[in-house]
Image (tube, rainbow, N blue to C red):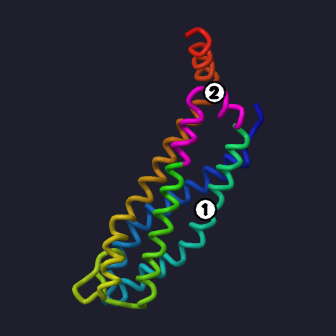
Amino acid sequence: MARNTLSRSLHDLGLSAWFGGTLANAVALNPAAGEAHRAGDSGAVATKGWDRWTPINAAAIGAHLVGSVGQLAGNKTRLSSQDGVASMAVVKTGLTAAALGVTAYSRSLGKVVSAHGPVPVASGTEPTLETPDDVAAAQRKLDALQWVIPALTGALVAISAFAGEQQRPADQLTRLQRRFLG
């Protein structure tokens, strides 16, 4: 079996940064922005933080996708011959597509918030009564989506661990025995 160290590293490091960065921003940055002295500063702080994270997140996602393609290429024999690998890859691809979609949609909502400049908000994802309607609507959606991305990418981490377990010789032998011996 050939080694795929580079593609596995890109896959894992990219996914780790995507998961960890969005989780950290949801847990820390968005609520901390609400602690600014003026309500108008809260939105600016959150926007600045997310704007700084965006290129890193894009690079992480790119690394993950390049690594994923490398993993698919490196495991094409397993995909076609080992029981359960193709279905795992389909689930993983679906989760990746969902995470990409939610990430892109969240970014578009973030641009709505960012386009207004400093506006009064309670935190990075909580409007006040003075928050403009379109910003408030975007923030309410972002409040939910900030948890969806870590949930989807966390599920990708779990299924990646499952994929690694499928490569254990004992797992492969058990599957082969079931396939040929019934």
Instruction: Kindly identify the residue that appears in the image at 54 percent across and 39 percent down.
Output: 161
What number of labels is visible?
Answer: 2
Could you say where residue 71 lies in the image, as x and y percent from the top left?
Answer: 68, 44
Could you say where residue 138 lies in the image, as x and y percent from the top left?
Answer: 36, 77
Does residue 166 sit above or below 21 in this rendering? above
Does residue 129 sit above or below 65 in this rendering? below
Quadrant position of the C terminus in the picture = top right
Helix or strand or loop: what does disc 2 sit on? loop
Quarter of the image for residue 177 reads: top right
The secondary structure that most of the magenta stretch takes on is helix
Instruction: Tell me the kind of residue under disc 2.
Output: Gln
The residue furthest right is: 2
The residue at which mark 1 appears reads as: 60
**Distance (Cα) linking label 2 and label 1:** 30 Å
The circle on residue 30 is none
Instruction: Kindly identify the residue that appears in the image at 67 percent across and 51 percent down.
Output: 67
Q: Nearer the viewer, residue 99 or 40?
A: 99
Is the C-beta separation of discs 2 and 1 under 8 Å? no
The residue at which mark 2 appears reads as: 82
Instruction: Kindly identify the residue that appears in the image at 55 percent across and 59 percent down.
Output: 17
Q: Is residue 82 magenta?
A: yes
Residue numbers of the magenta segment: 76-93
Instruction: Tell me the kind of residue under disc 1.
Output: Ala
